Image: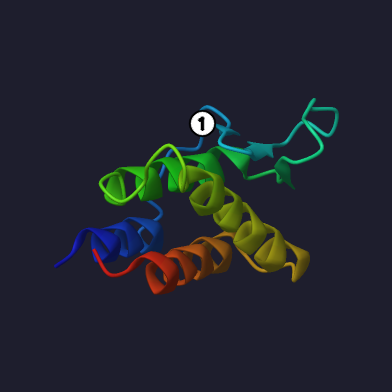
Amino acid sequence: MGKINNLRLLIEKQEYPKVFPEWGGANLIITKDLKREHLNHDILVYSKNASALSWLVTKLSEIYELEINYINKYSFYPSIGEDLIKSISKKESLFDTMIYVVDEIEKKWGEK
């Protein structure tokens, strides 16, 4: 079983931390703080589930670490943010949002 499928299993079993540092880097910010400072070009994701979503980004970063470099990280991470915003705006559950993002990143960056 591949790394991306192992991540799906962790999500299905809800085996992710309830407390995790909020993500901020490579033009992506995930936060539950509505007053969080950011730059105009940052993709800003507001969610009460910022910890779980930040964990997800960290796991995806680990899975695709060999493909991510100092240039393409500015497309990798913001694309995750855009996918998060798309799912959150549809008021999907945390589970559905996380699986949607994993599926979308796998489509864009390949199976791992």
Crowding around mark 1 (Cα neighbors within 10 Å: few <14, some 14 to 19, many 20+) is few
Q: Is residue 22 above or below residue 82?
A: above
x and y percentages locating residue 89 in the rendered image: 77, 65
Q: Name the residue carrying label 1.
A: 19
Identify the residue shown where x is 23% and y is 63%.
112
Q: 7 or 40, which lies in front?
A: 40
Residue found at the far left of this picture: 1
Colour logic:
rainbow
**Lateral position of residue 6 relative to residue 19, left or right:** left
x and y percentages locating residue 29 in the rendered image: 65, 37
Query: Callout 1, which amino acid?
Result: Val
For residue 44, what is the image quadrant? top right
**Lateral position of residue 65 relative to residue 41, left or right:** left
Identify the residue shown where x is 41% and y is 74%.
107
x and y percentages locating residue 19 in the rendered image: 51, 31
Circle 1 — which element?
loop
